[in-house]
Structure formats: C-alpha cells, structure tokens
Amino acid sequence: MLRAAQKDLQKVFVVFLIGFIGTFYALRLYVWDFLKGVTEAKMDEVARNSYEIIAQTPFDVILLQAKIGMIVGIILGLPVFLYFSRDALRERGLWPSSPVARWKLAVIGLLATVLFVTGVAYGYGVFFPFMFAFLANNALSAGFTPTYSIVLWAQFIFLLTLSFGLAAQLPLAMSGLAYAEIVPYETFRDKWRHAVVGVFAFGAMFTPPDPFTQIMWAIPMLTLYGFSLYLTKIVVTTRRGSERIDVTATARKRWNLVLGVAAVGFLAVYAFYARGGVAAANDLLAAIGSDYRVLAAGSTLGVAHETAAAIYGGVAAVLVAVLALLYFVYVELDAIAGSSEVGEPTAIDFSTLDEAGVRAAPPEAFAAMSEEEALAEARAAMDDDQPEKAQAILDRFDDVEAAAEQSATEDVADRTSRATGTFLEGMTDGEADEDDLGGYYTDVTFVLDSLTSRAFRIVAVFGLVLAGTFGWLYTGGIGRVFEQFLSQLPSQVTPESITVVALHPMEALIFEVKFSTLVAVLVTLPMVAYYAWPALRERGFVRGRRRIIFGWTGALVAGLLGGFAVGYAYVAPHVISYLVADAVQADMIIAYRISNFFWLIFFTTAGIGLLTDVVVLMVLLNTASVSYRTMRGRWREVTVGILAFAAIFTPADVFTMFLVTIPLMAAYGVGLGVLFVLTLGGRRDLTAWRSAKA
C-alpha cells in the first residue's frame, strides 16, 4: 500500500497536517471555552464559583491538544491514503465493489452524518448541562471540591460525545441490517425487551449511575428504538415486495402541498424574527429560570434585521419542504407496509413478485410450501410468461429443502455421537473423579442450583442494602463521615489543612457505587451461606447443622467491629497524621482525590476488621471440616481470588491492588499459623475435636 501510494504520500501528509494543526488551534481558541460553557450552563452560582478545571502537570494541556489533533489528523488522512493505495488493494481483492449507485451511498453517508450531529446536539444541548450541574452539586453537598483534571474532564466529554453520536445511528443500523437480511426485522420486533435492558446497561457504563441521568439517556434511546423499529418494518416490506417508490412522481403529485408547507414555514420564521418573537421567547426563558437566550437575526449574520429574517425564513422554507416531501414518501411506504403482513414471512403473495422479489423473499416463505404448491406457483409464473420467475421459485424451494435435510442429518449425527460418547464414558470411566475439573464443575452447579429457589430473596436483600447504602452516601453521608473522621485527627493536623477534591466528574459517584456494592456483598454472604449449607453438606464440603451460620455471622461481625473500632480510633488517624506531617510543616497544600482518601480510611479502619475476620473465618472453616492441610495446599488459588477481588473493588492502579493483596495474604499466613498451633501441626483438626467433645 505504501509503494502504491508513494507518489501521493505528500498529499496524505498535508491532509494529516491540516487536521492536526487545525484541531490544535481550534481547541486552543474555541473548543475549550465552548466545553467550559456547556459544563457551566445549568450550574447555580455556588457551583459555578466553586468548581475548577486544572492541569496536574505543566504538559497536560499541550499534550492533550496534540493527542486530539493527531487522532483527528489520522481520521482525516486515512481515507485519502486508502484512496491513493487502491491499486494495491484491488490486486488483492480488498477494494470494495458495490452495485449500489454512488448517489445512494452519498445519501446514506449524509443521513449518518445528520444522525450523528443530532445525537451530539442532544448531548451538548440537553444532557451535558444537567449532568455536570448534578455532579458538581453532588460533590459540593458531600463537602468536596469539584476540581476536574482537564485530561479526565476532556476524555469524559469526548467519550460521551462519541456514545451519543453512535447511539443516534440506530435507525440507519437497524434498517440496514434488516434490509441486508443480516438481522431479520422479526428479531428486532420480538427482542424489544432485550433492547430495553441493553439501553439501560449501555447507559450505566457511559453515564453517571444516578436515576436522573439514566432517564435522560434511556427515554430518547427507547423513543429512537421505537421509531427505528417502525422504519425497519417499512424498509423490509418494500424489500420483500415488488413495488418501488418514485420520489420524483411523489413530488409531482404533491407539489402544491409541499409549496404550501414551505410558504407557511417561511412566514412563521420571518414573523418570529421580525414581529417580536425573539423578545417573547427570551421573556419566557427568563420566567422559567433558564440562562439561554435567543439572539436577534441581524446580530448573527451581520446584515440588516429584515434581511436576516428573510434569510432565516428561506432556510426554514427549504428544510420544511424537504421534510414535507419525505413525509409524503413515508406515507406511500406506510401504505405499502399496511398492505402486507411483514410480521409473517409465509404470508407473501408470490403473484405480486417479480424474479428479483422471489430471490429476495425470506426462506420461511418457501419452507412453509409443499412440493405441489411450489410447482403450482411455478406453473402460474409460466402462464404469465415469466419463465425467469418460475425458475427462481423452483431454485429457492430446492435450496431451502436441501438446507433443511442437511440440518436434520447433522442433528441426528450429533445426537448419536453424544449418546455413544456418554455410553462409552460410562463403560470405561465407571464414575466421575471428584478431584478433576469436571467434578468441581458438578459441585458448583449443584450448589448454585440449590440457591435458585432463594435467588429472589438474596437479590432483594442485596439490592436493598446496595440502595440504602448508596442513598445514605448520596444524600450527604459521605460528607458526614469525612467531617467526623477529621475531628479524630491529632491536634497538630487541623481539618482545614486537608482538602478532598474530585479530579473526574464521576469520581464521587463511582466511589459511592463501589463502596455500596462492597457493603451489600458482605451483608449478603451470610445469607447465601445459610441457604447453600445443605447442598455444601451433601457434597461433603462442610459438616454440622445450618444453625451454625448464626454463630459464624456473630463471630465475623464481632471481629469486624473490633478491628474497625481499633482502626478508627488509633490506626487511621495516626497513619494519615504521619503521611501529612511533613507537608503540614512545610506549609504545603494537601489535596487528596476522593477515591484515594476514602479507600485509605477504609483500609485503615474496616480493613483492620477484615484482616481480623480472615483469621476468624479460617478457624471457623476448620471447624466445618476444611482441613488445615487443604488451606495450606490451596494458597495459590486463594492468592488469585484475592487479586481478582482487589482488581474489582479498588481504584484502577496496580499499586493499590497490591496494597490490598499483600495485607490479606499476610492475614492468611497468620491464620495458617494460628491453625498450625490449634490443630497441632495439622494432625488433629478442630472438626475432630468437636466431634470427640460431642
């Protein structure tokens, strides 16, 4: 490709350079101010004066501008490079060749661009202002300063911008997939519940995890899905039928209505700008407390007021005329859709199809036919002097029949193979080895199946604890914890010397969700163990009765509370005092990130209790027939599990992950030491001691 485009690489580089330099200076001169204006649009006076956008290093801004400029330059230069290297791609059969006319491809590209811009406009005009106001007020209500890093802030905005633009492509994507028969229309229609779950799941990943922004994301997306579904129905109906829409004929037939609507659009816009509409709209915006204002026509175009109003009216007339024409085309398509049962592919009337329509018809229409019916349709086509259509009917029927026979043969062979394999396995292996991977999988499946009937209770308790903890933190609980903890610090460290900031707009919410999930897991685990106890006992993992769970829970809670009290009263204040002592003496500004500061508090308070519970739990497990030798021999699996836990429930950096893993593994080692003493080196587990005592 490089050799094929060698003589034109300078042109590619010029395009890249234009994109790079243009983006670099556009960010510097216009984009940052625009994004800051969007961020502040719906903030109240307190939030607007409190939040800041900062650079953490001297190179943050210039490197960020260079990075964005390079990305834009590559995006602009790549199509040019591919075009100039088309000869090399053609030689290898990689250059696309489509029978679709170029003007149709241009229309599809224009439609995709319009949809992308519409999605982005909704994000910047509606979603972003409300979201940033909510996030800033949430941080301030908790006593934190929303001090956003320009890198994290920009990445967050650009990620959401891309998500809104791509989400707006839904009508084009659904209709295109259905038209090409990659995904049938019936799948989109029947799986709408899955689409609803997918919309909320996508929103949970790319938007703040609060109900307000979730609704602001979900309602437009679900509305767009409904519109896309109906548009897909019309497209598929016309694809499966033989009728075609002539846009030119529709324009000739409806020219009077199109011109009338255009005239109304021109007069409405002209009257709005020339007859006091701007002042009335601004008064209404002021009455509802909005900071938005409609600008006068002359102030934006630099011409006389009446001329500008006429220009705006002309633009509106053209847009309204195009929309009216599209509407009339849509009405005719809808009429075609109404005359066909798109939901039932087998209800196609073959007498209305030509050869192309027969070959494009769904296979379900031929699968429902008998051989006599296929021959009858072919004879009818021959009687109508359409031999190509008759041959197409027979070809499609034979193809569907052959595919059905092959599928049936493969299914029978598969069932025979599975039955033979099962029989031979039973003859050769006797019974499964409980120590291999299959045995562990069987045990886990058995235990999980035993929890199925209790799943609703478990999920309900988990959800209630999660929602309650999150609600308490969200409504100011995290701020009260922060103030109470600062009051426990030694006298040489004043509360005013420590500031907690949010470098990412969603940092406070993400911490609240993670902490709430952790609390919900800890509360739900005893309940899960209680319900799973009979299955665990049947598979030989534990012994004793189920009421032992209450004793376990009491012991674990006692260990957790005892460790928490020691950590909160002594460990955490002295650790933080030690960490900030030199900075306080040097009169430095101490600003912690929310996640780092509160995970530090968690590790040095509740973390002490959890480390204590590790030892307590190991002793309890030993009383439930988990031997000392098993715990010592499975230390590698325990290490992997702790690493996975730390990766999910701690901030996303390797240092913090190991900061959690090492103390937990140390506590595991202490637990092994305690068990070594209690079990006399593993010679007499506590289970045997309890049995002898009983």
Image (cartoon, rainbow, N blue to C red):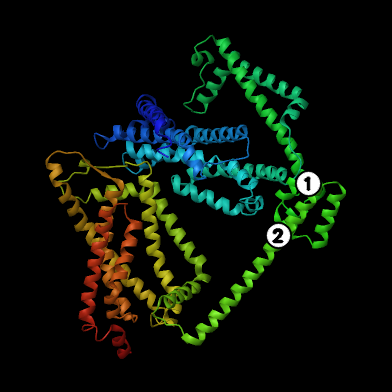
**Placement of 631 over or under 51, stated as above or below:** below
Could you tell whether 467 is left or right of 657 in the image? Answer: right
Q: Residue 277: image x %, image y %? A: 59, 18
Report x, y in % for residue 235: 68, 42
Q: Secondary structure at mark 1?
A: loop
Mark 2 surroundings within 10 Å by alpha-carbon count, few (fewer than 14), some (14 through 19), many (20 or more): some
- In the drawing, does residue 122 fall left or right of residue 71? right
Q: Quadrant of residue 49?
A: top left
Residue 621: tell me if it is visible: yes
Q: Amino acid at mark 1?
A: Leu
Residue 400, which numbered label?
Answer: 2
The single residue placed furthest to the top in the displayed view is 304
Mark yes or no: residue 349 visible. no
Sooner in the amino-acid sequence: mark 2 or mark 1: 1
Residue at image mark 1? 353
- The front one of 222 and 257 is 257
* Helix, strand or loop status at disc 2: helix
Which residue is rendered at x = 64% and y = 21% of the image? 317
Contact between labelled residues 1 and 2, with CB atoms less than 8 Å apart: no
